[in-house]
Image: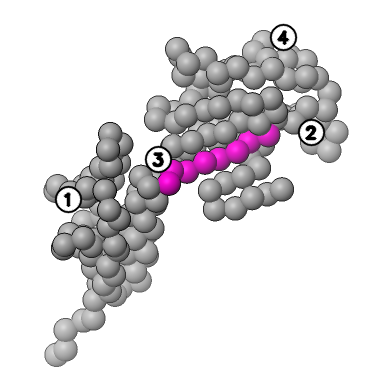
Amino acid sequence: MAEKEKLKEEIEIPEGINVNIEDDEIIMKKDSSELKRILNSRINVKIEENKIIVESGTTKNEKKIFGTTKAHIRNMIKGLTEGFKYKLQISTVHFPITVEHDKANNQLIVKNFLGEKKDRIIKLIEGVDIKIDKEFIEIESINIEKAGQCAANIEKGTKVKKKDRRIFQDGIFIIEKPTRRFL
């Protein structure tokens, strides 16, 4: 009986990035930045010379996990070399919104949203840099998941409820992701 074929792919490690695999965790370091990710036990990941080799079986589930693992490793490398940036726009139709970054408590404070007296407080994620410039908010991080989740939290924190969205178009909206632009 013939042995099953295996999926195999090599991912080049760029200059300056140090990669280690301990137990089921891959750790990438560059200068003072570090990213960690727990790997699936069904996928075989090893380091040879300056390449990360990802191997897997060919069942439907293993193919899915294989592709996801490759994408995570590539995102870690891209994050350490370039970083990820999300851009949000503050949109006001009815009431002027004031947005402040409270660095001490790591939160974003939205004042006067739809004329509300109470401020909206949005919790931010550690490891994400935020810059507010007039009507734009930029979110930068080496971890794509943290940057994306932070942008989603901000957008969700200014969601208009129980009002007609065609009329009340106020809020903070994602206009640019690392992979594509919306405007």
Q: Position of residue 113 (x, y in %)?
A: 72, 19
Residue at 68%, 34% in the rendered image: 89
Q: Give the extent of the magenta segment.
A: 82-89
CA distance for labels 1 and 3: 19 Å
Relative to 137, 166 lies left or right: right
Q: Nearer the viewer, mark 1 or mark 2?
A: 1
Dominant SS type (magenta): strand
Name the residue carrying label 2. Answer: 169
Q: Looking at the image, is mark 3 or mark 4 earlier in the sequence?
A: 4
Secondary structure of the residue carrying tag 2 is loop
Quadrant of the image occupied by residue 6 = bottom left
CA distance for labels 1 and 2: 48 Å
**The residue under label 2 is which amino acid type?**
Gln
Name the disc covering residue 120, or none.
Answer: none
Secondary structure of the residue carrying tag 3 is loop
Q: Looking at the image, is mark 3 or mark 2 earlier in the sequence?
A: 3
Quarter of the image containing the N terminus? bottom left
**The residue under label 4 is which amino acid type?**
Lys
